[in-house]
Image (cartoon, rainbow, N blue to C red):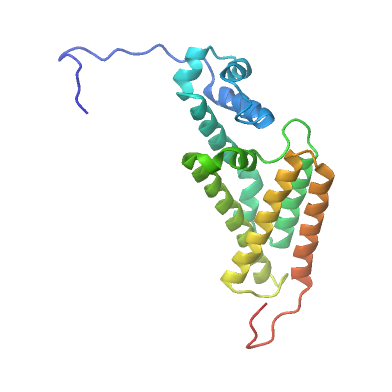
Amino acid sequence: MQDDRKPGRAPRRGRPRSYDLDAATAAALHALWTRGYGATTVEDLVEATGLAPSSLYAAFGSKHGVLEASLARYDRDREDLLAPLECGEAGLEDLRLFFASVRTSLTRPGAPGCFMVNTATEVASRDERIAAHANRYRDRVRDAIASALTRAAALGEVPPAGAQETLGRARIVQAALFGVQVAARSGATEEALATLGALEGQVGQWAAAPAAAPGGDGL
């Protein structure tokens, strides 16, 4: 990039930022989560964050930039939920605690459903960058579940399975969980809770299934 500053002139320093960017992102996330991207106006974001329009654009660049920052913040906030699956020492117990956290979130007022799933459902089909955010999150959830199932097999809690079978089971759990979140977003909380219960029952059936005989296909 060509540097068009005059020789010998020190670069001008902008005024120090007078707002908390992290707090503004959290406030924007809550507004977008509650209303949805399409229904949230720039005026809504200005009101939610407490930033002047000029500061909002300086911080995020655009309404789309606010959404991307909010998705990144949401992904970071899910660390406490996913880390035990990714790095835990238990197997099925880590999954049970994960399901319990999801159950709690389904009955918490204010922001129904999963923000990443909500946004993907609304925006991802026409926005490659948002689709990339959603796909990374989906893959992370799937792989975290697969890690817990792998540990469960190593601990003898579920019959041993090959990597592809374990990944397939993780895909089933992840897809069902995302469906649960869509149901919750639409207001069908009881249906979402019932589906989550059925999913927990399915994992319990895997745990109760007998190990495949030597030479079997493991299914």
In the picture as drawn, the residue positioned furthest to the front comes out as 126
Residue at the image position 54 percent from the left and 20 percent from the top: 20
Residue 52 x %, y %: 53, 11
- Give 168 or 6, whichever is nearer the viewer: 168
Residue at the image position 49 percent from the left and 29 percent from the top: 65
Please, is residue 172 above or below residue 106 in the view? Answer: below
In which quadrant will I find the C terminus? bottom right
Residue at the image position 63 percent from the left and 60 percent from the top: 171
Residue at the image position 72 percent from the left and 62 percent from the top: 92
**How many marks overall?**
0
Residue 84 visible in the current orientation: yes
Image side of residue 9 versus residue 129, left or right: left
In which quadrant will I find the N terminus? top left
Please, is residue 135 above or below residue 27 in the view? Answer: below
Please, is residue 7 above or below residue 137 in the view? Answer: above
Residue 142 x %, y %: 60, 56
- Give 70 or 130, whichever is nearer the viewer: 130
In the picture as drawn, the residue positioned furthest to the left comes out as 7
Residue 87 visible in the current orientation: no
Image side of residue 15 versus residue 182, left or right: left
Residue 178 x %, y %: 67, 49
In the picture as drawn, the residue positioned furthest to the bottom comes out as 215
Q: Quadrant of residue 207?
A: bottom right
Residue 187 x %, y %: 79, 38
Image side of residue 33 versus residue 126, left or right: right
